[in-house]
Image (cartoon, rainbow, N blue to C red):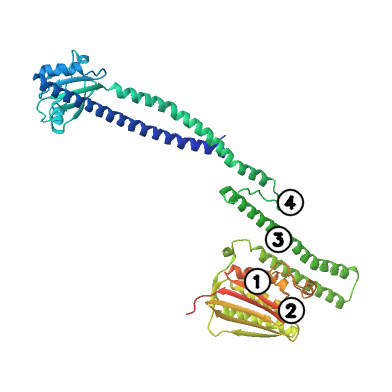
């Protein structure tokens, strides 16, 4: 039962509400008690002042302290209150009929306080008593009016009873309402759960319903839909990657198998065997390059920093080494390679092997798509505190519609020609991954028939 979120929410809500109601009930009870006692004191004081005023008037007429007291108490009737008149020393002069046989004993300290302040309150003989001087000079005596404490206690008892009945009732009703609201509020989550359970690899195009996109549940559904979109894109890309990789691997394997079967089909001359072995070697090397590229790209989804062997790199030396290596390929095809570097040394932290691999991939791509007699330039410079590597050629160029996809895996502008040149469509994808793994950016500008320019920006160390 506690596995249900709405049950836990209801219990939490009921617990917090119970504590709040109990605290509120205590506050109300003690506040009401103080108010009841203050009102009782105020009412007793008013009654005592009335008795004192009537006593002074009667005393002025009869000129007898004892007779004035008896007359006033006979004329004034307070059924629920006890009235007593005393002299300045606290000795009784007269008392109401409901005090027959008993006396309200007032402490001397209370009399002194009443004489000093004009009024005093004290609890005595189970009564709450207000003491007021009879005269303005406070020397004549005191009027003392008392009321049983049970008057206030009865009111507080009724309040306690109401709170004992009301708090549980409110808590019960509120908990039921909280459970209903929790169930209603979590209903969209239950719907999202059932919809999500129906989504699998076969229907990643399905999306959750978003009723109110601005609230928390709507934003959660939108986030899940975005996640599903990314998963669908990744799954589609993975399927395409596997299909393209299988296609690329199938061709050299088919050549290897076919050439081997032909070579073993009958006895051949040494020259024929050498040609077959040479072809098998070329296809094996191509297959090895494809597998190596696939292995490198397989590291891409992993934590980039974990696969980089970071160390200080001199880009000037790396570029020069790559230019010397690419010079062999360019010379073999009849293409001129020009190197341009700034005299100041440019350095960065990174994986030197991967950086060289990136530059060689760009140079190899330029050599492949530049016709004999063409020119390739490799330039290194510092721009706005960053290192900038530029590889340009005046080859066949790239159509504008294809420029956004040249960094996709296995993508080739001219598939037939690229296959004839030995490309698998992985070089630029690897170059882009290496650049981004080092916190840089790579871009291309090109025009058909005018060549292409690949520009790489990497964060360089500060010079000096």
Q: Is residue 197 left or right of residue 171?
A: right
In the foreground, 149 or 78: 78
Judging by the rendered image, the residue that carries numbered circle 4 is 202
Label 3: how many Cα within 10 Å (few below 14, some 14–19, many 20+): some
Q: Earlier in the sequence, mark 2 or mark 3?
A: 3
Q: Nearer the viewer, mark 2 or mark 4?
A: 2
Q: CA distance from mark 2 to mark 3?
A: 28 Å
Q: CA distance from mark 3 to mark 4?
A: 14 Å
User: 133 above or below 338?
Assistant: above
Judging by the rendered image, the residue that carries numbered circle 1 is 431
Q: Earlier in the sequence, mark 1 or mark 4?
A: 4
Judging by the rendered image, the residue that carries numbered circle 2 is 448
Q: Earlier in the sequence, mark 1 or mark 3?
A: 3
Q: Nearer the viewer, mark 1 or mark 4?
A: 4
Percent x, y of residue 207? 68, 51
**Which residue shows up at 70% across the image and 76% down it?**
365
User: 20 above or below 54?
Assistant: below
Judging by the rendered image, the residue that carries numbered circle 3 is 237
Q: CA distance from mark 1 to mark 2?
A: 22 Å
Q: Answer yes or no: is residue 237 visible.
A: yes
Q: CA distance from mark 1 to mark 4?
A: 33 Å
């Amino acid at each position: 039962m506690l596995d249900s979120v709405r049950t836990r929410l209801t219990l939490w809500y009921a617990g917090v509400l119970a504590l709040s109601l109990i605290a509120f009930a205590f506050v109300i009870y003690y506040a009401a008690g103080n108010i009841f006692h203050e009102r009782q004191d105020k009412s007793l004081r008013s009654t005592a002042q009335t008795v004192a005023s009537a006593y002074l008037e009667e005393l002025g007429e009869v000129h007898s302290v004892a007779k004035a007291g008896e007359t006033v108490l006979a004329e004034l009737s307070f059924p629920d209150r006890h009235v007593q008149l005393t002299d300045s020393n606290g000795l009784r002069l007269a008392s109401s009929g409901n005090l027959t046989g008993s006396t309200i004993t007032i402490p001397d300290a209370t009399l002194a306080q009443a004489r000093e302040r004009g009024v005093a309150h004290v609890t005595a003989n189970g009564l709450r008593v207000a003491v007021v001087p009879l005269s303005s000079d406070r020397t004549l005596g005191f009027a003392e009016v008392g009321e049983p404490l049970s008057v206030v206690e009865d009111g507080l008892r009724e309040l306690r009873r109401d709170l004992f009945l009301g708090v549980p009732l409110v808590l019960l009703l509120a908990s039921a309402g909280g459970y209903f609201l929790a169930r209603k509020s979590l209903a969209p989550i239950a719907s999202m759960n059932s919809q999500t359970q129906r989504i699998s690899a076969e229907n990643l195009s399905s999306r959750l319903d978003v009723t109110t996109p601005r609230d928390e549940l709507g934003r959660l559904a939108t986030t899940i839909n975005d996640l599903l979109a990314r998963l669908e894109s990744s799954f589609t890309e993975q399927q395409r990657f596997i299909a393209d990789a299988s296609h690329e691997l199938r061709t050299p394997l088919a050549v290897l198998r076919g050439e081997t079967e032909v070579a073993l089909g009958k006895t051949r001359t040494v020259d024929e065997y050498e040609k077959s072995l040479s072809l098998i070697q070329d296809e094996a090397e191509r297959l090895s390059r494809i597998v190596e590229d696939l292995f490198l790209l397989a590291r891409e989804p992993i934590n980039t920093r974990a696969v980089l062997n970071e160390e200080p790199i001199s880009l000037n030396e790396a570029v020069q080494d790559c230019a010397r290596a690419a010079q062999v390929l360019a010379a073999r095809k009849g293409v001129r390679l020009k190197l341009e570097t700034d005299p100041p040394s440019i350095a960065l932290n990174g994986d030197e092997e991967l950086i060289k691999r990136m530059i060689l991939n760009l140079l190899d791509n330029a050599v492949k798509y530049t016709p004999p007699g063409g020119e390739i330039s490799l330039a290194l410079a510092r721009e706005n505190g960053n290192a900038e590597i530029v590889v340009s050629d005046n080859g066949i160029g790239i159509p504008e519609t294809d420029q956004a996809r040249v960094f996709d895996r296995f993508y080739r502008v001219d598939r037939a020609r690229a296959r004839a040149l030995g490309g698998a469509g992985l070089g630029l994808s690897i170059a882009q991954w290496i650049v981004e793994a080092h916190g840089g950016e790579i871009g291309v500008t090109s025009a058909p028939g005018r060549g292409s320019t690949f520009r790489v920006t990497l964060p360089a160390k500060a010079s000096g």
